[in-house]
Amino acid sequence: MARILAGAVAILLASGASAAPLATIDRNGSIVSVEPYAPNIVRVTIARDHDLADAAPGYGVTAKSNASGWAHNNGVAGDVFTSGAINLTIDAQPWPKAPTQMERYFAPSLPPVSLTVKRADGQPIVTMKGWDMVPHEVAGERTFKVGASFSITPDEHFYGLGQNQEGTLDLKGRTIDCRHYYDAPAGEQVCVPVLVSSNNYMIVWDNPSTTTVSVGMNNATHFQSNVGERVSFFVITGADSDDLYKGYRLLTGVTPLPPKAAFGLIQSKARYETQNELLGIAKGYRDRGYPLDVMVLDWFYWTRMGQLDIDRTYFPDPGAMNRQLHDWGMHSIISVWPRFEKESRYFDLLASKGWFLKDKDGKPVDGLAVRTDRAGALIDSTNPDARAWFWTKIRDNIASQGFDWFWLDETEPDLVPDGYFYSIGTGDRYHNLFPLLHTGGVAEGSARDRPQFRNLILARAAYLGTQANGAIFWTSDVQSTWEALKRQVPANLGMAASGIAYTSSDTGGWQWPNGPKAQRPVLVDPAGATAMAPSYTDYPELFVRWFQLNTFTPTLRIHGQRPAAAIWEYGKAAEPILADYLRLRYQLMPYLYALGHDTYQTGAPFMRALFMDFPKDPVAATVGDQYMFGPAFLVAPVTDQGATTRKVYLPAGSDWYDWWTNRKITGGQWIDAAAPIERMPLFVRAGSIVPLGAPIQNTATRQPLSEIRVFPGRDTSFALYDDDGVTNQYQKDGGKTATLRWDEATARLSASGALPSGQSPAALVKVIRAQ
C-alpha cells in the first residue's frame, strides 16, 4: 500500500499547481490540509497519508495557492481559518471513547472529519459532514472509492456537473453519473465536476475518475469518485454567481475570446464528400446574400483513419479551396480524429513508442467492442511527447493546406479508457481527463507556431480547465427530434453553469432525420425540402425552431447526418424564416462580441440560467427551458411541435419589453406568449442597451453600428468592444472599448469615449417607447 500511495503522490505532484497549505492538521489519523487560493477560495484535502494531504491539486487547476489575508487560530471548537470573505472551521475531534456494543459492529472505518464554511459575518454557507474511503481493486490497482458529504438547506437548488441531457436544470434530488459517456440514453454526458448552489457557493471536486453525485438527497449532497486515495475539493464563495465564475477562472484558466468568425454561422454536414460540394454550399450562401463565416469539413476526407492526410481524389487542391473561402471572407474548420487504424502509416511508429492507450500487456487497444465502432487505437494524449507529435503532424499535413482551425472530435473518448492504461496511470483513475490534455496539446502548439493567429477548437467533451484551451463545445450526436430539441436548453445551461461558456448544439440534430408522426398541424410547409425523407413532414418546422434557439446560443452551427443542410434546403416556407434569424444573428454581432469579451475578462457565461441574474426570485431557481442571453435578452425557445404559444416566466424585479412588439410587461408573472412559427418569444429587460450592427456577409467585413436601442427602466451601462477578430492582439492592447451609459432621469445616452466603430452615438440612439 505504501508503494501505491507513493506512486499516487508522484502523479499528483506532476500534474497540477504546486501546493502550499496554510496548515495541515491531524484528526486522530485523518490528515486535513487547508490551502487558500484567494479570500473567497479555499481547498480542503483529506487523506490518511501526510504526503497525499499536502500534495498539489490534480489536472485542470493551474492557479497557485495564495494565503494573503488569511489567518489560522486554534481553539476549543477546532482549527479556525479566516479571511475577509470566509470563516472555515475544522471541527475538533476528541479522542474516541470506548465503543458501545452497537458501535463495535458499526464502527466507522475512518477517523471522522467535519468542517464548516461560513461567510465573514458568520452566516453559514456549507458544512462537510463526513468523508469516506472504501477499498477496492480497479484495473489491477488496489485503491479506494473516495467521497464526502455536504449539508444543504431546504430552499437550496443546484446546477452544473457538466452536460446532462435528461432534461432538468435543477439537480436537487437527482443522482448524476459524472463521467464522459457518449452512449448515455438521453444524449452524451460530459463531466465537469463543478457544483453550483443557489446559495452562492461552488464546490469544485478535484478527482478525474468517474464520480457519482447524489445532489440534495436525504438532506445532503454526496460525492463519490471511483478511484483515489484522498478527498480534495475547493469551495468558492461570492456575493453573486459572477463572483463564483471569477473564482473558477482564477483556478482553472481564462476563457479566451474566440475569433469573431466563431460568433457567425458555422456551416457543416456529415459530410461534404468533395471539394466542389463544399465550395458549392459556400457559394450558395454568397450568391443568395446570406451571411456565412465558417465552412466545416467533417470526417472521412482522409484516405484511412490515422493517415492524417486529405484524399486528393475528392479534394484535389485543398489549398486552393481554402484560398477561395478566404477570398470570400470565410474560414474553415477540419475534423481530426485521435484514432489510428492498424493499416495507417503512423500506427507502427506510435505503437513502438508506447503512445497509444494500452491494455494490461502493453498492447494498443484497438476499437470499442461494445458497439460496432471498432476501428482504431487511441493516441495517448496524457503523454506530452505524443500530443506534441500529434500537433506537428496536423500542422504540417493539414494546417499547411490553409485550414484555419481544428475540430478535435472523439474527445470523450469513444475508446472508453476504463480497464486500460494511459502513460500517467489507469484509464479508470483518469476517465474524464482526456479532453483537457488532448485539446491542450493543440492549443499549446498553435500558440507556439501561430502566435498571432487566434486559436479555435471545436470539441465535444470537457473537463476542469478545458475552456482555457480555446475550445467551443456542443451536445454531440443528438437525435433529430422534438424530444431532443427540448433537452438541449437545460443541457446547455448546465454546461454553462459549470464554467464552460461556449456551448450549443447541432442545429436540427445530428442523427438522420427520423421522428414520430406529427400530432398537430405542421406549421412549415415541407414542399421543396431536400434535407430529409418526405415522410418526416414536420422536420422543416423542427429545424426552424432549433435554428431560432441557436440564434441565441454562444455559437450557431448547422450540422447533421442528412442529405442536405444549408438553410435553403428545408423548403420554400422555411427559408425566409431562417434567413431572417440568420440576419438577426449578424445584426446582434456587436452585442455578441462584447459578451464574449466580458466572459474573457470575468469567466462568467453569457448564456445564463435565470438563477444567475434573479437569485431572489424563487420561481426563477427552477426554470430550465428559458434563459438570459447576456444582460438584455430573455429567450424562451419553442420546443413543441405545432405550438403557436408558450408559457413564459418573466422574473420579478424588472419590467420586460416584448422584442417583437415593444409591449411592456410587469415582471414576476407567467404569461402566455405568442409564438407563431416566425417568432420565438423574446423579451428585453427594462433598463437595457442593445447595440445593433449593419448588414454584413461575414465578420471579415467591417461592421458599423446601425442603431443603439435603449429599453428604458433604470440606469444602466453596456461595454462595447471590438478588435481585428483574428489575431491575439486583444490580449495585449485590449482592442477598442467604449462604455455606453443610460441615465434614466435625464433620458440620455452617453459614451465614455469614441465608439469602436468611430461613429457618434448620438445619431444612433433609438429609445424604445412602450406599447
Image: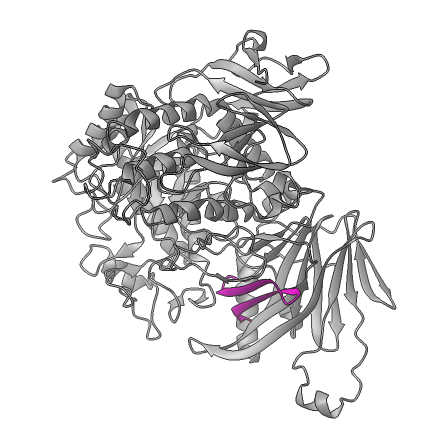
Residue 277 in view in this figure: yes
Q: Which is more toward the observer, 597 or 577?
A: 577
Range drawn in magenta: 207-229
Compared with 698, 749 (above or below) is: above
Residue at screen point 61% across, 67% down = 231
Q: Is residue 210 magenta?
A: yes
Residue at screen point 22% across, 29% down = 281
From the top left corner, tell me how far across and down residue 738 is, in percent: 60, 19
Q: Is residue 529 left or right of residue 756?
A: left
Q: Spot the residue most to the bottom.
A: 101
From the top left corner, tell me how far across and down residue 332 is, in percent: 31, 33
From the top left corner, tell me how far across and down residue 449 is, in percent: 39, 38
From the top left corner, tell me how far across and down residue 550 is, in percent: 41, 36
Residue 245 in view in this figure: no
Q: Is residue 359 left or right of residue 427?
A: left
Q: Spot the residue most to the top.
A: 763
Quarter where residue 689 is shown: top right
Q: Quadrant of the N terminus?
A: bottom right
Residue at screen point 63% across, 38% down = 613
Q: Is residue 455 left or right of residue 366?
A: right
